[in-house]
Image: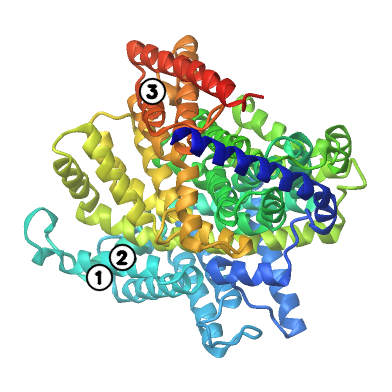
């Protein structure tokens, strides 16, 4: 029976190889027809707008209004750019003005609903824009009074606070959809009527006067730490990303990935992983990254021989992982640094090894799938040459090197480092004609930076309502105690319940508010069990991000399916399978904090990291059911068992895992030689 199955598989592999040889002849023509400059077609743009509410914006028909809006966006960027150098106004003044500018831009960019005009600003929008600036005018005009009356608000304070909450909720609804504002309303209701709840979740109860003033007049509500980060770090790094995009960084990442990996087995899939990882770290939007990079990688993967669902899954899993990858981490690292009270550079160091393990897991599965199905790479003679790509655009890496130097060695603030890096990017881009930006390009980048920040800033403001209620009522601590109780004081069960909580809270939410909410509600549960704070926050962050991959709400996977033509749900499950290392890595660094380089020596860090690499390799082999040849169910179970042994940092469990790894290699080589499949 087994011999008949082996013969059938051999015939399938031979047929696949024959088809791939024919396909390889057509790949050169396919490459010529696929653009790698990141410019989307009309259909791709429509797909992006359909799945990503943040990308569904107005196109103003009135040229005068369009020019005024363009100028306003540039002015907003210049305000944030220049205050990074000269210093910002006092806290509430600066944050209230930042939120007002983001609200005003948002009401211009995003229509009220699907039936509203997508080419003109309505009279309702103009009223909301005016109201957006009424709040900061009030704060700036009576700043000392607002501060002194915090906790004892008057009628005017109540009116301003109510206007602010309404504007933030409405803007958030337009931009991100119903999930975040509805969740915020649920928390407001909890703050108002929680006194009527029995048991742990009951509290003393608060009036609207007390709650609204908490959102408005201090730094624990809407104008809290998330808006602080949005008004400083996030805005500047989004602006940095826009400048980099105008200089041709996206095309550079695509070309260098094609040059390095395009010719290898299953090359297009590896190109997708590399390019999407780099771009995802900078732009921070998984769905936008899928559509932008996937526009050229997904057709190539399909042409090479990958299924529609697998091609979409590769792009989705790699795009989501970009937000885990230093140095930018999709801007979430800045909020994590603010929450933990540590330097941004510290977050980068802690995040590096787990992120690389995640991408290693995807690359291993891609390689094994290509070997199993005998998929070829792209024609090397028709790919970009790495030497020529580096000669033409390699200097664009200098601003990133400069940024890392400023963050780690200069001793300056992150904000000032970002300011100097933006200037350095403009200067470096001028070194070659192919990347040189005109004045109009720079102005376009400044305008684009402001537009891209709107969705992030409004989400941060809206999530401030949730954080404000949690701090006022003690809900975060109560939730932490509940998770621990459900876990019966067991670390493993508590981790599982925390994971489930994070993924549920992260469904349908943009990545940054998803992290903020999960960090507020779920991370304290782990901290109470003695887990280092950075490990607890990273654990919550990972699973908040993976909500973008996990059905039934898997926006990144659905976007990839829209490009590949595959089944959305199947693409979602294939994405989870590809990202399986990412679901296990957080458990690894909880049980082995050395992976986060926490309180460890260099030797110990290397030992644990190497063991984790072996573990990720075994996970990939178990999931794909292939190493040198196909693996039967028993070997797959043994492989996963070896991976689990390597999760722990215990020396003896690592030894068991390494022995299993070596034995599996030996057995697979023997079986591959017997089957004649060993290359």
Residue at image coords 45%, 69%: 172
Q: Quadrant of the N terminus?
A: top left
Question: Dot 2 corresponds to which residue?
Answer: 213
Q: Indicate which disc, 2 or 3, sits on the residue closer to the N terminus.
A: 2
Q: Quadrant of the C terminus?
A: top right
Question: Mark 1: which secondary structure?
Answer: helix
Residue 451 lies, in percent from the top left, at 63, 64
Marks 1 and 3, how far apart at CA: 58 Å
| Label 1, residues with CA under 10 Å away: few <14, some 14-19, many ≥20 | some
Residue at image coords 54%, 67%: 51
Residue 274 shows in this picture: no
Residue 560 lies, in percent from the top left, at 58, 58
Residue at image coords 69%, 81%: 60
Question: Mark 2: which secondary structure?
Answer: helix
**Can you say whether 410 is above or below 557 in the image?**
above
Q: Does the residue at mark 1 contact the one at mark 3 (Cβ under 8 Å)?
A: no
Q: Indicate which disc, 1 or 3, sits on the residue closer to the N terminus.
A: 1
In the displayed structure image, the side of residue 615 where residue 34 appears, left or right: right
Query: Which residue is at the front of the view, 575 or 141?
Result: 575
| Residue 642 disc label | 3
Q: Does the residue at mark 1 contact the one at mark 2 (Cβ under 8 Å)?
A: yes
Question: Mark 3: which secondary structure?
Answer: helix
| Residue 209 disc label | 1
Query: Which residue is at the front of the view, 650 or 573?
Result: 573
In the displayed structure image, the side of residue 347 where residue 160 appears, left or right: left
Query: Which residue is at the front of the view, 56 or 472?
Result: 56
Residue 137 shows in this picture: yes
């Amino acid at each position: 029976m087994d011999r008949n199955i082996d013969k059938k598989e051999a015939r399938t592999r031979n047929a696949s190889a024959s088809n791939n040889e024919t396909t390889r002849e057509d790949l050169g023509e396919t490459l010529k027809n696929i653009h790698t400059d990141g410019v989307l077609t009309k259909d791709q743009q429509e797909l992006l707008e359909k799945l990503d509410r943040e990308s569904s914006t107005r196109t103003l028909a009135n040229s005068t209004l369009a020019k005024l809006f363009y100028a306003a966006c540039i002015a907003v960027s210049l305000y944030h750019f220049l205050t990074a150098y000269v210093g910002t106004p006092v806290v509430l003044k600066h944050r209230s003005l930042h939120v007002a500018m983001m609200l005003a831009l948002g009401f211009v960019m995003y229509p009220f609903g699907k039936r509203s005009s997508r080419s003109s600003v309505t009279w309702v929008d103009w009223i909301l824009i005016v109201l957006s600036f009424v709040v900061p005018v009030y704060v700036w005009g009576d700043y000392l009074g607002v501060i002194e009356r915090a906790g004892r608000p008057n009628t005017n304070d109540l009116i301003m606070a109510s206007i602010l909450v309404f504007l933030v909720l409405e803007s958030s609804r337009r931009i991100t959809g119903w999930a975040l504002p509805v969740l915020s309303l649920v928390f407001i209701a909890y703050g108002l009527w929680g006194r009527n709840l029995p048991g742990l979740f009951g509290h003393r109860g608060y009036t609207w006067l007390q709650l609204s003033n908490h959102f408005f007049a201090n730094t624990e509500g809407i104008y809290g730490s998330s808006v602080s980060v949005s008004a400083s770090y996030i805005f500047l790094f989004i602006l940095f990303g826009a400048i980099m995009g105008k200089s041709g960084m996206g095309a550079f990442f695509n070309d260098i990935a094609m040059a390095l990996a395009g010719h290898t087995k299953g090359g297009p899939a590896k190109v997708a992983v590399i390019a999407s990882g780099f771009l995802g770290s900078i732009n921070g939007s998984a769905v936008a990254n899928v559509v932008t990079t996937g526009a050229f990688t997904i057709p190539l993967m399909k042409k090479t021989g990958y299924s529609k669902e697998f091609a979409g899954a590769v792009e989705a899993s790699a795009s989501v992982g970009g937000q885990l990858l230093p140095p930018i981490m999709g801007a979430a690292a800045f909020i994590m640094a603010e929450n933990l009270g540590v330097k941004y550079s510290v977050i980068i160091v802690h995040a590096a090894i787990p992120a690389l393990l995640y991408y290693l897991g995807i690359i291993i599965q891609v390689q094994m799938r290509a070997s199993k199905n005998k998929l070829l790479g792209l024609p090397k003679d028709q790919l970009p040459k790495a030497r020529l790509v580096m000669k033409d655009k390699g200097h664009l890496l200098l601003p990133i090197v400069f940024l890392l130097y400023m963050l780690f060695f200069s001793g300056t603030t992150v904000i000032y480092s970002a300011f100097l890096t933006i200037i350095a990017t403009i200067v470096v881009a001028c070194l070659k004609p192919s990347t040189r930006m005109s004045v109009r390009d720079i102005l376009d980048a400044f305008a684009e930076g402001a537009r891209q920040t709107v969705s992030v800033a409004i989400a941060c403001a809206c999530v401030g309502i949730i954080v404000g209620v949690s701090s006022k009522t003690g809900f975060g601590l109560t939730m932490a105690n509940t998770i621990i109780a459900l876990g019966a004081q067991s670390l493993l069960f508590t981790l599982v319940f925390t994971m489930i909580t994070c993924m549920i809270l992260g469904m349908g939410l943009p990545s940054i508010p998803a992290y903020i909410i999960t960090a507020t509600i779920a991370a304290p549960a782990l901290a109470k069990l003695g887990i280092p704070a950075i490990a607890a926050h990273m654990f919550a962050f990972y699973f908040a991000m993976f909500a973008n991959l996990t059905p039934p709400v898997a926006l990144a996977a659905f976007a990839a399916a829209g490009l590949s033509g595959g089944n959305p749900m199947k693409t979602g499950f294939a994405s989870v399978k590809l990202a399986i290392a990412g679901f296990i890595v957080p458990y690894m660094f909880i049980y082995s904090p050395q992976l986060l380089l926490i309180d460890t020596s260099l030797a110990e860090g290397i030992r644990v990291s190497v063991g984790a690499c072996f573990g990720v390799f075994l996970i990939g082999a178990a999931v794909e059911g292939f190493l040198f040849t196909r693996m039967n169910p028993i070997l797959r179970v043994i492989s996963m068992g070896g991976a689990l042994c390597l999760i722990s940092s215990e020396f003896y469990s690592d030894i068991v895992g390494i022995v299993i790894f070596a034995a599996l290699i030996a057995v697979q080589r023997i079986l591959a030689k017997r089957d004649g499949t060993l290359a």
